[in-house]
Image (cartoon, helix red, strand yellow):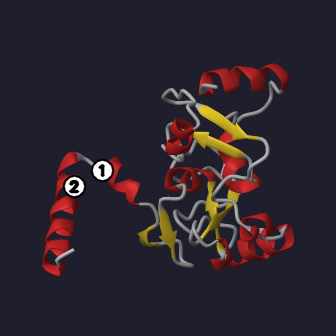
């Protein structure tokens, strides 16, 4: 199903929904085995099962299997009460950009800030959370590991390098090539 088809389907039954792309969250947050061609996650699985895929589409791989990244920690999450305490600790601001909940977003003033639960480390949900506005949470997805002040500590997904321009990609390549040639691996 393409994003356009998904949007048309959801709007047909839920015309007031603002974010019709929630399908991408079904896998990571709810355990559904849904993959996205745009994010290039698990396309090998689609190939193995001889499923055709198209750019900018979502795929329901199985109703019986859970999404491979789905863990008990992700099931548990953080309670609404604990998240409210966490938001209060951050003065109801996004840990990354500082936008205040209920006010115009600093990155996109046409949107009102809505704080979301963001993992400090997307690979280890038990490491904790920070409040992030929808703009930051969407932009950073699962690309980075954050500290408790909302600053990027390290890369969580090496594919983030593919988002950089070619010069940066070449620089990263040269740095890594040099490192691994010295180690003889």
Identify the residue under disc 2. Answer: 168
Q: In the displayed structure, would residue 51 be above or below residue 165?
A: above
| Rendered location of residue 143, percent (x, y) | 47, 59
Q: In the displayed structure, would residue 52 be above or below residue 180?
A: above
Q: Answer left or right for 40 relative to 87.
A: left
Mark 1 → mark 2, Cα distance in angstroms? 6 Å
Are the residues at dot 1 and dot 2 in contact (C-beta closer than 8 Å)? yes
Residue 179 is drawn in which quadrant? Answer: bottom left
| Rendered location of residue 57, percent (x, y) | 57, 30
Give 78 or 178, whichever is nearer the viewer: 178
Q: Quadrant of the C terminus?
A: bottom left
Q: Secondary structure at mark 2?
A: helix
Question: Residue sitting at 52 percent across and 77 percent down?
Answer: 147
Q: Secondary structure at mark 1?
A: loop
Count residues near mark 2 (Cα–Cα under 10 Å), then give few for <14, some for 14-19, many for 20+. Answer: few
Q: Quadrant of the N terminus?
A: top right
Q: In the displayed structure, would residue 128 be above or below residue 37?
A: below
Count residues near mark 1 (Cα–Cα under 10 Å), then give few for <14, some for 14-19, many for 20+. Answer: few
Mark number for residue 164?
1
Total label count? 2
| Rendered location of residue 165, percent (x, y) | 25, 47
Residue 73 is drawn in which quadrant? Answer: bottom right
Mark number for residue 63?
none
């Amino acid at each position: 199903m393409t994003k356009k088809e998904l949007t048309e389907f959801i709007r047909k039954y839920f015309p007031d929904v603002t974010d019709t792309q929630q399908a991408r969250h079904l896998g990571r947050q709810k355990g559904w085995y849904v993959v996205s061609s745009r994010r290039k996650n698990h396309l090998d699985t689609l190939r193995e099962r001889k499923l055709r895929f198209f750019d900018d589409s979502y795929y329901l791989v199985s109703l019986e299997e859970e999404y491979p990244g789905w863990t008990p920690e992700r099931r548990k999450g953080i309670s609404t009460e604990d998240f409210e305490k966490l938001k209060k600790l951050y003065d109801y601001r996004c840990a990354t950009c500082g936008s205040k909940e209920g006010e115009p977003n600093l990155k996109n003033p046409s949107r009102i800030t809505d704080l979301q639960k963001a993992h400090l480390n997307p690979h280890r949900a038990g490491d904790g959370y920070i409040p992030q506005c929808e703009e930051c949470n969407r932009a950073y997805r699962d690309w980075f590991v954050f500290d408790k002040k909302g600053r990027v500590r390290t890369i969580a997904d090496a594919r983030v390098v593919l988002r950089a321009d070619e010069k940066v990609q070449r620089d990263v390549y040269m740095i890594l090539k040099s490192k691994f040639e010295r180690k003889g691996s």
